[in-house]
Amino acid sequence: MLRCTAKLLAQIDDSPVAMVLNLTGDLAVGRTQDRSTVGCLNNRVSDAKRIIDFRGGLTYCNVWELVHLLNEVPLKPIGYSRGLKTMQAVVAGKEPPPKTSTATVYQFKITLKETDPPIWRRIQVKDCTLDKLHEHIQTAMGWTNSHLHQFMIGGVVHGDPELLCEGWVDETPPVNSRRTKVSKIIPKDGSRFAFDYEYDFGDSWEHEILFEGCLPAEKGTRYPLCVEGERACPPEDVGGVWSFAEFLKAIADPIHKRHEELLEWSGPYNAEQFDAQAATKEMRKGLPDWRKMEWI
């Protein structure tokens, strides 16, 4: 390996080599128990030479191209023979190098609009479709997915066409939320931005979904995850934000004329109760797939 590298370095200008070495820092040389790795490295040196020959030498401009091409081919995951074939294809310009990526987690804060004090959740999820994000929102908030929903992103409706397009003739159908991924809607620079999510078009529960940023997935941590939140989700079919406020007054006042009626309807309800661990458990359990359910 070292002899091959020395031969390669002897054929190229000193200045770009010095530039690269100054950026790499100290080099450590050691033995390896994996001969396939050594073989793959040797072949990558040979491929690097072919790249240099093809480009007419190593210059300040194409040194970065060479480094990029070599670094884009992972050794361990693809193995020796596949690594050689992949690099040869890259050199020949037939296909792009395979991508290596670190798992990214997306953090969102979900706030139910017009609630005072606000009902909110902060969740972390891996890249997924908007349809799956809807499921995470439902389970984190405490809803039961009993009604229709839609996202409004940049003034454009995103949703499940199978649910939202029935009877639509003259209107523009929604962007398919079953195909649109979270990674495609967030800003490329990772900056914060907000969009809307509406659940139950009758009660019209409108939520602000605030993308707060990306972070690397923590080793040993399972996702999705509900990090924190406050207050219980309103009961399904309570009638919307204003009816929910009346509901809270009624169940808190034993002499209210609807006190007994609403308690019997809702069962025990504590507006201040919220458990992030319980919400995480529900998020990981997920929702039943209604598309596979048998309807009577």
Image (cartoon, rainbow, N blue to C red):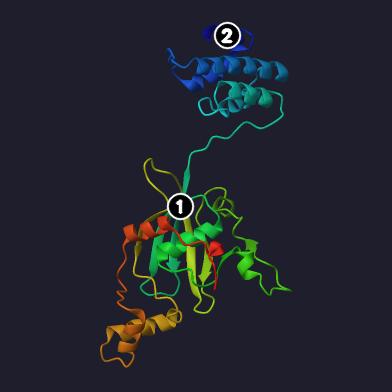
Q: Secondary structure at mark 1?
A: strand
Q: Position of residue 142 (x, y in %)?
A: 40, 67
Q: Compared with residue 69, is residue 286 higher up or lower down, i.e. above or below?
A: below
- Would residue 107 be seen by someone viewing this image from the given angle? yes
Q: Nearer the viewer, mark 2 or mark 1?
A: 1
In the figure, is residue 31 to the left or right of 251? Answer: right
Mark 1 nearby-residue class (10 Å; few <14, some 14–19, many ≥20): many
Give above or below for 220 relative to 15: below
Q: Residue at x 52, y 17 (%)?
A: 36
> Which x, y percent locates residue 233?
38, 71
Q: Position of residue 215 (x, y in %)?
A: 44, 46
Q: Which mark is residue 125?
A: 1
- The foreground one among 291 and 222 is 291
Up-down: is 135 above or below 81? Answer: below
Q: Residue at x 71, y 27 (%)?
A: 93
* 2 or 1: tag closer to the N-terminus: 2
Res 4 label: 2
Mark drawn on residue 262: none
User: Under tag 2, what secondary structure?
Assistant: helix
Callout 2 amino acid: Cys
> Rounded to the nearest whole Å, what is the CA distance between mark 2 and mark 1?
46 Å
Identify which residue, 194 or 130, lies in the foreground: 130
The image quadrant that residue 73 belongs to is: top right
Q: Amino acid at mark 1?
A: Val
